[in-house]
Amino acid sequence: MKNIILGISTLLMALVFTSCDKEEMIGVEGLPNEASTFLTSHFADIKVSNVKKEKEGLSGTEYTVYLQNGVQVKFDKNGNWEDVEAPNGQALPTSFIPAKIVEYVQANYPTEGINSIDKERNRYDVELTNGLDLEFNANGEFVKID
């Protein structure tokens, strides 16, 4: 009986480990063209430290690019940016952020920059350099302080 339980436990653990996400470090040349274009357009002067390619279960492949200045950029399988984060207190460039969001932040928080932005299906989550979290709808209109 012990051997059966041990065998089933071993089989279950093997299944769990083989179904887990798979990660690998790749070179910049392994990124989709859209992601490479994004990086050269908005972070041209900053070198890439590492690129992680991660195969997610049902959602496909995701890429995380680590820049030398501490900024992290996540891309979906097609190379569209999903999330961009700077180290705490550091502002991101705003060239890729929807204009309405940039304008709102400049008008209402003129001494703050955007520290991170997360693009969801129907909204944007924005964190300012002072730690304040803001939510915007898909059109870039302010919704609430989160």
Image (cartoon, rainbow, N blue to C red):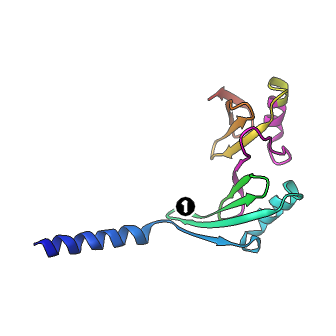
Q: Is residue 52 above or below residue 71?
A: below
Q: Residue 39: image x %, image y %?
A: 81, 59
Nearer to the camera, 50 or 141: 50
Q: Position of residue 22 (x, y in %)?
A: 53, 69
Q: Is residue 66 left or right of residue 104?
A: left
Quarter of the figure with the C terminus = top right
Q: Residue at x 65, y 26 (%)?
A: 145
Let me know if residue 69 is in the magenta part.
no
Identify the element where label 1 is drawn: loop
Q: Is residue 18 left or right of residue 115?
A: left
Q: Range of the magenta residues?
A: 79-105
Label tally: 1
> Which image quarter: residue 61?
bottom right
Magenta stretch: includes residue 80: yes
Q: Is residue 16 shown above or below 125?
A: below
The residue nearer to you, when weighing 110 against 95, is 110
Residue at the image point whose x is 72% and y is 29% from the top: 142
Along the viewing direction, whichever of 36 and 67 lies nearer the viewer: 67
The x, y position of residue 128, in whole percent, is: 73, 34
Mark 1 surroundings within 10 Å by alpha-carbon count, few (fewer than 14), some (14 through 19), many (20 or more): few
- Residue 144: give x, y in percent of width and height: 65, 27
Q: Quadrant of the N terminus?
A: bottom left
Q: Is residue 85 above or below residue 67?
A: above
In the rendered structure, which amino acid carries the disc numbered 1? Ser
- Circle 1 residue: 59
Instruction: Give the quarter of the image for residue 26.
Output: bottom right
Residue 38 picture quarter: bottom right
Left or right: residue 93 compared with residue 77: right
Check the image and report above or below for 15 versus 133: below
